[in-house]
Image (cartoon, rainbow, N blue to C red):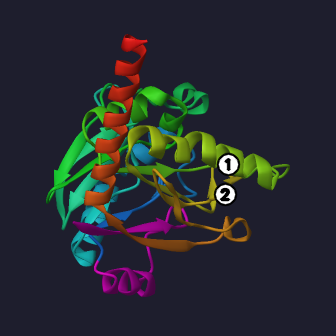
């Protein structure tokens, strides 16, 4: 079974342009993913202000999913629930909301400004493909990948924002991608789709090295010279192949355990 995924490295606060939407639509994608805080605009000076527009944001994202005739991993929105705020990513299939995932490991700046940690991992079965969602800093915690793997995730989508670091070296960037994304793909036995935002949040510049990776390596990635520009990545994923990888991975692990017991 083959599925086509599109990672939209877009400017936060803005949906794809008409030209970009036509281009994405022509790809006939099964899944499209947007960045974390994808509609967080310059007027959103704090998360509470952004939460006032959650309904408008979700309506706009639902229309986008319908226009593209695809399953949209809708970046993330600030979602109020009672006295709490959550960083939530919605899964919207052709305009119909199927569910959401709430970021389980907000960073310190989010916690200080009122973002509450989510409590559970979720997976979705979309026409036979098992999809999980993590959000940005969730990848710092191996248990987040492990939970997705335990639920049989074929593809893990990761809406992300990453602050621009002027002193970053190419080696440091590659090391982070290896440590937090490529290793996650290998350990979970899943495809990983990291989708970054560009532009600014709270007046701070973002950098994006969006990536689509398999357990055996990078399939496509935004080059470092393009990490502050809008980009669209496309890849066709073989779901049967990644499931066979997991089967062999599990068999190898079982043989190792048996070998230790015999020894």
Q: Is residue 170 left or right of residue 47?
A: right
Regarding residue 46, the answer to whether it shows in the image is no
Question: Mark 2 or 1 closer to N-term?
Answer: 1
Q: Pick the quarter of the image with the N terminus.
A: bottom left
- Residues 174 and 34: in front is 174
For this view, does 169 lie left or right of residue 211? Answer: right
Residue at x 42%, y 61% (from the top left corner) = 34
- Above or below residue 83? Residue 239 is below
Label 2 – label 1 distance at C-alpha? 6 Å
Which x, y percent locates residue 225?
Answer: 74, 70
Describe the element under mark 2 as helix, strand or loop.
Answer: loop
Residue for point 23% across, 58% down: 92
Q: Position of residue 10 (x, y in %)?
A: 52, 67
Q: Is residue 66 magenta?
A: no
- The residue nearer to you, when weighing 209 against 82, is 209
Residue shown at the point (44%, 73%) measured from the top left: 234
Residue lying at the far front of the rendered structure: 263
Residues packed near mark 2 inside 10 Å, few (<14), some (14 to 19) or many (20 plus): many
Which residue position holds label 2? 207
* Magenta-highlighted residues: 1-28
Compared across the picture, whether 205 is left or right of 262 comes to right
Is residue 7 one of those drawn in magenta? yes
Q: Which of the numbered marks, if any, corresponds to residue 163? A: 1
Label 1 secondary element: loop
Rendered location of residue 252, percent (x, y): 37, 35
């Amino acid at each position: 079974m083959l599925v086509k995924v599109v990672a939209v490295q877009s400017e936060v606060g803005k949906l794809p342009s008409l030209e970009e939407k036509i281009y994405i639509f022509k790809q006939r994608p099964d899944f499209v993913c947007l960045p974390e805080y994808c509609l967080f605009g310059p007027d959103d000076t704090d998360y509470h202000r952004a939460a006032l527009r959650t309904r408008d944001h979700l309506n706009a994202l639902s229309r986008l999913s319908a226009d593209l005739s695809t399953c949209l991993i809708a970046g993330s929105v600030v979602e109020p629930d009672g006295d709490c705020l959550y960083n939530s990513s919605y899964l919207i299939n052709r305009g119909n909301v199927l569910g959401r995932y709430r970021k389980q490991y907000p960073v310190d700046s989010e916690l200080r400004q009122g973002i509450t940690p989510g409590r559970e991992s979720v997976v979705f079965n979309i026409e036979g493909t098992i999809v999980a969602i993590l959000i940005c800093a969730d990848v710092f915690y191996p248990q987040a990948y492990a939970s997705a793997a335990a639920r049989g995730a074929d593809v893990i989508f990761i809406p992300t924002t990453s602050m621009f670091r002027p002193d970053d070296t190419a080696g440091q960037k590659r090391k982070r991608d290896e440590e937090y994304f490529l290793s996650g793909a290998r350990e979970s036995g899943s495809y990983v789709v990291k989708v970054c935002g560009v532009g600014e949040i709270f007046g701070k510049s973002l950098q994006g090295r969006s990536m689509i990776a398999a357990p055996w390596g990078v399939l496509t990635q935004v080059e470092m010279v393009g990490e502050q520009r809008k980009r669209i990545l496309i890849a066709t994923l073989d779901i049967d192949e990644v499931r066979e990888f997991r089967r062999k991975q599990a068999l190898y692990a079982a043989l190792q355990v048996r070998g230790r017991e015999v020894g």
